[in-house]
């Protein structure tokens, strides 16, 4: 079956037994169930491709079926020492599985998704870090920062709004947020006493994200 193609089909169940799937492509098809019942080992290569399955019913049964399909595909790529291919289907498996998890595991899975794509998307760590820095820079303005012994704090009841002053204050807040996230310290701006908890939380998140981002990147490079 090597170099074959299946296009735009509804496949209720696929059972694969010791088959050469090198170069096989399944494109635009809906797969309800896929199992490998190998006595020895089905062969896949880097050109083997199974397209992302488009959800139809979006219910628990469908999510469970499709994440199992992705899991079986991922495991078979891993058996063939194709770790990059394994990673892609592992990502799809975990992302689909998240839909059927209970609340606490779902939160954990969601954090794994947005911070590093379950270890398969190193750029997610950079995106998450930038968003976190931006959010904390806004929070510092709301809770207060200290610049030249003056407390700067924005509230909804502030009288007047001068864009030039806001940009200057936001620049100080952004510098503070970057320094806290990267754990390199502060420049002129400091967190006001009421903002100390914010700065501590941001530093912890920053340290964790550096580890997560570096780990995900090294994992991809080593592969």
Image (spheres, rainbow, N blue to C red):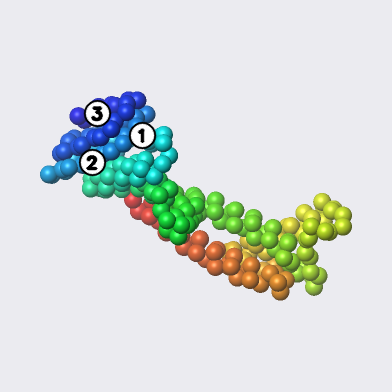
- Closer to the eye: label 1 or 2: 2
Indicate left or right for 143 with 215 as reference.
Answer: right
Give residue 51's mark: 1
User: Which x, y percent locates residue 107?
Assistant: 47, 57
Q: Is residue 55 left or right of residue 190?
A: left
Q: Secondary structure at mark 2?
A: strand
Residue 83 in view (yes/no): yes
**Pointer 2: what residue?**
35
Front one among 187 and 201: 201
Residue at 64% x, 55% y is 134
Q: Nearer the viewer, residue 175 or 131?
A: 131
According to the image, label 3 marks what residue?
3
| Gap in angstroms between the C-alphas marked 1 and 3 | 15 Å
Q: Are marks 3 and 2 in contact (CB under 8 Å)?
A: no
Indicate which disc residue 87 carries: none
Residue in the image at 25% along x and 27% along y: 4
Crowding at mark 2 (Cα within 10 Å: few <14, some 14-19, many 20+): some
CA gap, disc 1 to disc 2? 16 Å
Q: Residue 74 placed where, x, y %?
A: 30, 45
Q: Is residue 102 above or below residue 204?
A: above
Q: Measuring from the top left, give residue 204's x and y in whole percent.
A: 54, 68
């Amino acid at each position: 079956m090597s170099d074959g193609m299946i296009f735009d089909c509804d496949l209720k169940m696929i059972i694969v037994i010791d088959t050469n799937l090198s170069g096989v492509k399944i494109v635009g098809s809906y797969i309800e169930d896929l199992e490998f019942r190998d006595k020895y080992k089905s062969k896949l290569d880097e050109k083997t491709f199974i397209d992302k399955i488009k959800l139809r019913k979006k219910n628990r049964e469908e999510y469970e079926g499709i994440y199992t399909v992705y899991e079986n595909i991922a495991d078979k790529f891993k058996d063939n020492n194709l770790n990059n291919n394994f990673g892609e289907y592992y990502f799809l498996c975990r992302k689909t599985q998240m839909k059927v998890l209970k609340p606490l595991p779902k939160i954990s899975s969601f954090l794994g998704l947005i911070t590093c794509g379950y270890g398969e998307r190193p750029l997610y760590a950079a995106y998450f870090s930038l968003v976190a820095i931006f959010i904390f820079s806004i929070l510092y303005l709301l809770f207060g920062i200290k610049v030249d012994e003056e407390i700067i704090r924005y509230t909804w009841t502030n009288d007047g709004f001068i864009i030039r002053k806001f940009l200057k204050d936001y620049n100080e807040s952004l510098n503070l947020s970057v320094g806290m996230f990267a754990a390199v310290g502060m420049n002129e701006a400091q967190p006001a006493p009421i903002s100390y908890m914010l700065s501590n939380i941001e530093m912890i998140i920053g340290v964790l994200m550096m580890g997560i981002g570096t780990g995900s990147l090294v994992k991809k490079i080593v592969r």
